[in-house]
Amino acid sequence: MKLWEGLTDAAVDPSADGFNSSIGFDKRLYREDITGSIVHAQMLAHCNIITNDEAALIAEGLSGILEDIESGKLTIDLTQEDIHTFVEQTLTARIGETGKKLHTARSRNDQVALDMRLWCRQTTDGIISQLKELIGAICDKAEQYKTAIMPGYTHMQRAQPVTFGHHVLAYAMMFLRDIGRLKDCSKRANVSVIGCCALAGTTYNTDRAYEADALGFDSICMNSIDGVSDRDFLIELLSALSVIMMHLSRFSEELILWSGSEFSFVKLSDAYTTGSSIMPQKKNPDMAELCRGKTGRVYGDLFALLTVMKGLPLAYNKDMQEDKESVFDAADTVCACLQVFTGMIKTLTADTDAMSSAAKKGFINATDLADYFTGKGLPFRDAYKLCGKIVSYCIKQNKVLEDMSVDEYKSFYPGADKDVYAAVDLKNCVYRRISAGGTSPDSVSMQIEYLKNKIK
């Protein structure tokens, strides 16, 4: 039986019926649908629209359906049009005519919008928890390697010495901002739409604030047309999820590069790599590559919903049924990636010798040499030019800055002395970066403390 039978006999062509059905994917909203329905019945009794006994009977019936679904005793009927139909008709079959009163003063339009907001709130909280775990794993790795020197890069060229701990903390800061974006999204999603009905509200004297408060919402939407038409909160969630995936993808790219033999900076655990079917020497960073690849999938989910919504007139249109699969897919993908990525970070090891060896190449201490000459009285621009000449000389002589003699330095600048070696020592270059947020071990420790306090 269709909930909309009456004007028509509901004799829909079987292919159209299946095309119209959403229960194949909205079945996962059964918990939110039942939770919202229980509170809706309580509100109806609170407003004397139904009796307290009727509300109690409805709540008992709905609780039983929830318990039976979760225990596996009750299987969701996939021939039903949607999860709302299944729950309501199962309720009526169990408690009789009283079950038909549940849908008083609401429509499936505001009902599904409510379910999605409840789902969004819970899902966002879960992803925030996963991000906190990932940030914690990164902090632990940064603490372990806060003195491990590696080359920092710009334009994929060796630039200045940094520590491995400092480098990975940059991603922790990105994921912390992702938490902030999710919290902002959750705040705007946490507005109750139930009571907007189809689009114009209801003639019943309902108490929307009572229902919103009981469901943990901060407020009610103030325009009923907007309430059933709005999917901004889902688009915002998809946008935040896309940014998370972008950050995971960037980190994945570095792990893929670093784990290759050309770098050998890190070793990924066998638990997060695979082999080749034909090349026995291969150890492939498949999990990192999949996280990188699935980023495009989540981007696609965002653009799918943006495209669905871009030309819709007010109020509800069936097009909006297309919101769920995109949002569910994106959330599932992000959750899976975060779970795998966190394990990958927890189990990776860094090759400090390989990083140190790489740091000794590429003249990444040239800026520190310029600072040394500036300290001797040269204007920085003159010191910069002088260091360029020294680097050019070293390249021709197949030397690094540490190999030059004092006399060679003096030939470029008479004020140079043997204290130049302390200036270009890579460890000193790192440890002297004492500015807030810098790469010195003390600064890294402060960053770790900051992050851990933020995720408490």
Image (cartoon, rainbow, N blue to C red):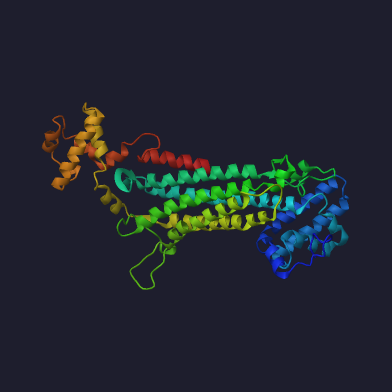
Residue 266 appears in the figure: no
Q: In which quarter of the image is residue 186?
A: top right
View extreme (bottom): residue: 278
24 displayed left or right of 40: left
Q: How many marks?
A: 0
Q: Position of residue 267 (x, y in %)?
A: 36, 58
Q: Position of residue 115 (x, y in %)?
A: 70, 52
The residue at 15%/32% (across/down) is 413
In the picture, which quadrant includes the C terminus? top right
Along the viewing direction, whichever of 223 and 146 lies nearer the viewer: 223
View extreme (top): residue: 377
- Up the image or down, 332 lies above or below 188; here it is below
The residue at 70%/66% (across/down) is 16
Residue 124 appears in the figure: yes
- Up the image or down, 390 lies above or below 198; here it is above
416 displayed left or right of 217: left
Along the viewing direction, whichever of 101 and 155 lies nearer the viewer: 155
In the picture, which quadrant includes the N terminus? bottom right
178 displayed left or right of 153: right
295 displayed left or right of 269: right
- Up the image or down, 34 lies above or below 201; here it is below
Q: Quadrant of residue 58?
A: bottom right
The residue at 36%/41% (across/down) is 441
Q: Where is residue 203 in the image (x, y as percent from the top left)?
A: 84, 44
Q: Where is residue 28 in the image (x, y as percent from the top left)?
A: 66, 60
